[in-house]
Amino acid sequence: MAFRRRARRMRWLGCYRLGLLWKALLVFLAIAFAGQLLGVIFSKSVPSERPHPMFSLPPAEAQGASLGSCRPHTHVMFLKTHKTASSTVLNMLYRFGDERGLRFALPLGYQFGYPLPFNAHRVKGYRGAHVVDFSIMGNHMRFNKAEVEKVMPPDTFYFSILRDPVALAESSYAYYKAVAPAFKRAKGLADFAADPWRHYDPRLRNNHYARNLLWFDFGLDHNANFSEALARRGEAAVRRAFRLVLLAEHFDQSMVLLRHALCWPLDAVVSFSLNARQQRGGRGGAGGSLALTEELHARLREWNALDWHLYQAFNRTFWEEVERFGRARMEEEVARLRARREVMARVCLRDGGRPVEASRIRDKTIRPFQSGLVKILGYELQPGLDNATSQACLRLIRPEIQYKDLLDARQFPRSSQPAAAPGAPYRKDAAHPRGAGVAERERDWDGSRLSHNQTSLLGQGRVLR
């Protein structure tokens, strides 16, 4: 009898304890469900602070399987020629070096003593050949290979970019009309091209913008009379100095060739057009692009015959490079580049990614510098970007002058001082007035003394004639 009572008590206790376990389990499940529900609600109400995935492509897509196991070039010299989309290319170099903490060879001002031939002592922080390890050089200079080699390491990759001299002449006229005496005197580009020597005096400062500007930037004698022998010698000098020469008219194909030559990731060569001018109609004025006639084309090519030879020669070389790369492969790579640019434009830019006048850009720190008689356009960032995405987008649209100042301040935090804007008038050195028995000296906008050395220094200090 006692045994039966004990058995019933044990069964009752067992059911009771089992009931407690079930109740505890139900309470736990209810708490977990409520926590999950609250988490969903919270995640919808509080924006994520993680970086936007726009710069997080899968490795194979970002690097491109065809690049293989090559190592990215980090020693790069870019000859920044004028009015050739070179500001956009320089932005790529700035971004690549900025993101990787590389050291830039920067000018004392904004250009390396241009239009004088480059001298190594114009590099800020230069203390003798290869004392400082500079990785990237790309600001405006008149090229001088021997002096550049004092600054840049022996394994440096040299490249530059060209543009059809007719389009270049039209752009130069619009951009430099206020500073080049030859352009100032002309009623319009057609008037200038009809009789260039009526307007052009080779002795006047800034007239180099009006004739064979590419030839001049490469360090060659741009006022030499054209001959096939001279043109071929200049072309050969450029080929010896540069491993790759790009074309502004085929910018996307150029970026594909550059990316593969440097072994850089796709995002490093994705860009928005910088330092572009506002396009407006007109004939012969200083505004936007002109309706150039065949006769005007012919006259401008004849006037810039050395540039025209250089462009034709490297145009042939460019398409030979494309053939070696593969036409079908090039089309695929260009499509990938353009698709990536569209993604970045949608994420980064207001107004559908269209460039806008500087006065419309709310953030004054990213307004492009205005020079000449045309309006230089810029971009506005899309509002509401998280901090990481905003910084990545800002690097893409930051104007050249502001970006140079930023890099300068990082490399030289104590000595950085804002320099005068490029294009500002030259200043006379008051210490040496005219007629004082000393050759007149003048100062560039960055404060350095100028001399009147006309020697061409692309080769070994020889003027090509």
Image: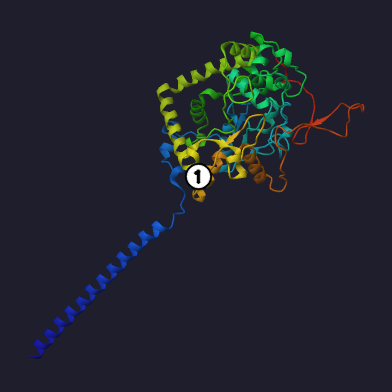
Q: Please tell me whether residue 136 is drawn above or below residue 257 in the rendered image.
A: below
In the foreground, 415 or 260: 415
Closer to the camera, 164 or 109? Answer: 164
Image quadrant where residue 424 sits: top right
Name the residue rendered at 57%, 26% in the picture.
280
For residue 234, say whether it is visible: yes
Which residue does the image show at 47% across and 21% down from the upper left?
Answer: 322
> Looking at the rendering, which quadrant does residue 286 occupy?
top right
Q: Is 168 left, or right, of 55 in this rendering? A: right
Task: Please name the amino acid that badge 1 sits on.
Answer: Gln
Dot 1 surroundings within 10 Å: few (below 14), some, or many (20 or more)?
Answer: some
| Secondary structure category for the residue under label 1 | loop
The relative height of residue 212 versus residue 258 in the rendered view (above or below) is above
Quarter of the image where the N terminus is located: bottom left
| Residue under label 1 | 382
Relative image position of residue 240 (x, y in whole percent):
61, 20
Query: Which image quarter: residue 125?
Result: top right
- Image quadrant occupied by the C terminus: top right
Q: Where is residue 205 in the image (x, y as percent from the top left)?
A: 76, 24
Residue 201 image position (x, y, % from top left): 75, 17
Up/down of 111 relative to 36, above or below: above
Examine the rendering and report whether any part of residue 219 can be seen.
Answer: no
In the rendered view, does 103 fall on the left or right side of 52?
A: right
**In percent of the image, x 29 and y 70: which residue is there?**
28
* Residue 26 sits above or below residue 380 on the image: below
Q: From the top left corner, tell me how far across and down residue 352 is, in percent.
A: 47, 38
Number of marks in picture: 1
